[in-house]
Amino acid sequence: MTVKSLFRTFSQFNVPVFQRDYSWDKQYYSKFIDDIIHGITVKDDQLETSKYFIGTMVFAGDTGDNIIDVVDGQQRLTVITILLSVISEQLLKIGEKGLATATFKYVKEKNDNDEYIRHLISDTSYPYLDSFIQSLDKKNSQTVQTDEEKNLKDTYTYFSKRLSPERIEELAKFKKVEYKEILISIRDQVLSSMVISILTPDRDNAFMIFEILNAKGKNLVSIDLIKNVLFEEFHNDPNGLESNAEIMWEKIKSNLRTRDQSVGLATFYRHYWISKYKKVTNAKLYDSFKTEIKGSDKKQKYYDFIVDLEKESRNYIAIIHPILSEDYDNRQEYRWLEQSLNALNDTFGLVQTRVALLALMDVKERKLISPKKFKEAINYIENIIFMHTGIAKKQANIYESRFSILAINLRKTQSKNNTSEIINKHLYNAFSDKELTYQEFEKGFIEQTYKKGKYNTNLLTKYIIKKIGCYFQDEELFIPNNSIEHILNEDSDYPQTMGIGNLLLLETVLNNKAGNSMYAEKKGVYLESKNKQVEKFVESYNTFSIDDIEKRSVNLSKWYYKNILKKV
């Protein structure tokens, strides 16, 4: 049938909560509108549409139902709705109110009781979908809050630009055709597109058809297929497990977007899975789930699985973006952890550590590791990443498998002694070959630079200088109100001045006071500093020159290797 027939046959399409969010990116929605426009031909200055096949859609419900559930096809129905809404708006802009209303009836229209009904219903994107996409008057539309809503707005904005008069005029085949007629033709091309519609009154059958259509074709990411399997088991549960699971699933998504560094559900799920069950590729996650989570009382196992996912999603976002007051009741003894996690995420930018960190958080919550051992493990991970990835710039592909083995074993521990044995074997011993020799360390260390401005290359150098400052002050935490000082003024003609041997951690007030003075004048400002490293530097250098920078870089390298990394 055609899209038009589909919309005329059923009044409303409901997207159940088990469905994934609208997630099409530009690659997909740009191809969709390209195909639609390409399918329109011009013959004797007249526009003609062609048959365009959209694919198969699966629905659950009866033929006479006004509302049917969308089991497979939500992404396409959403993008069709967005495109029809954009066409309606463009028609309205050129004064074609009647045509705009006629087009918009496929988005929203009045029923026999004079009540507005939305043809596409989605709880996850409500009220944004209703107030922005499914409304011609957008002045009261909701602000974007979620990734799904951002995707909706991005698609709408893209379609609006593509269908603007200016962009349409760029298409040679439409040169002699009125803009209004082009919009009508694009609308008709969408509505005349063909779709294979599968409707089954048995929702369980719909789930099965959905799985068959998608499991082999890889049209969906693994988490979407897994979600389908989970909610299929909860369907029509007499004890309300379905609604409870829906609430829990929404909590998972909410947890992952509650902070500045929100993360996708698929990314979290894979890290969770290989941290607890088995190291597999993205493509194998679905099969692995079906293999691992099975046995008697499947319904309860599935529900417990979702509950565990929700708990772990809270730990996951706390690893990515720790907030002391929320995650650790503002307990100051965890400030070191907040600092280490921020370094792993922001300075080193390595996501693979999350696999191990999830498991370490788990044994900590189960009180199967002492605070001292927990801290040692986190610090070791931080130092390994610093050396192997930060200093040596070696590939990170070795981490995931090793961290997965460590994590899965930690999940099985039942005693503190066993935890210590696992950490010794699968962390300290397993990564010992990635610890740098001094020669390797020095080579990478002396290459570190820092220049004024926001540069990614500054991050590691700033981390090193802050660590040195902490050591001299006998402080564990980075010292506040301090900044990076170039001893000799930064000069692009002398790249050495940006090298690590030319840097100090200095109170920001004094840094500003020193300005671009010569070293002889800066020394007087340095003497006002309370930083012991600065005091020691002034004692050691009566004068300081370009030649001293390289020598000091090497000396700092030896000092850091011995005192911070505790290597000999």
Image (tube, helix red, strand yellow):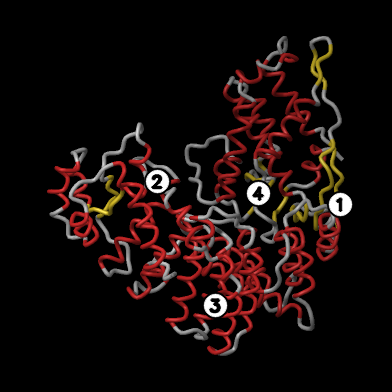
In this rendered view, identify the residue nearer to me: 247 or 363.
Answer: 363
Give percent across and percent down for residue 317.
51, 63
Closer to the camera in the image, 21 or 77:
21
How far is mark 2 from mark 1, CA to CA? 62 Å
Three-letter code for the amino acid on which mark 3 is drawn? Asp
**SS at circle 2:** loop
In the image, is residue 227 above or below residue 172? below
3D distance between C-alphas at marks 2 and 3: 38 Å
- Asked if residue 318 is positioned above or below residue 396 in the image, the reply reads below
User: At 58% from the left edge and 52% from the top edge, which residue is drawn?
Assistant: 126
| Tag 4 residue | 22
Q: Which residue is mark 2?
A: 449
Residue 194 picture quarter: top right
Label 2 with label 3: CB-CB less than 8 Å: no
Label 4 crowding class (10 Å Cα cut-off): few <14, some 14-19, many 20+? many
Locate residue 538 relative to residue 141 in the image: left or right.
left
Q: Residue at x 59, y 51 (%)?
A: 125
Give how far apart the Cα atoms at labels 1 and 3 are: 44 Å
Dot 2 or dot 3: first in sequence order is 3
Disc 4 and disc 1 in contact, CB within 8 angstroms = no
| Label located before the other in sequence (3 or 4) | 4
Q: Is residue 458 left or right of residue 81?
A: left
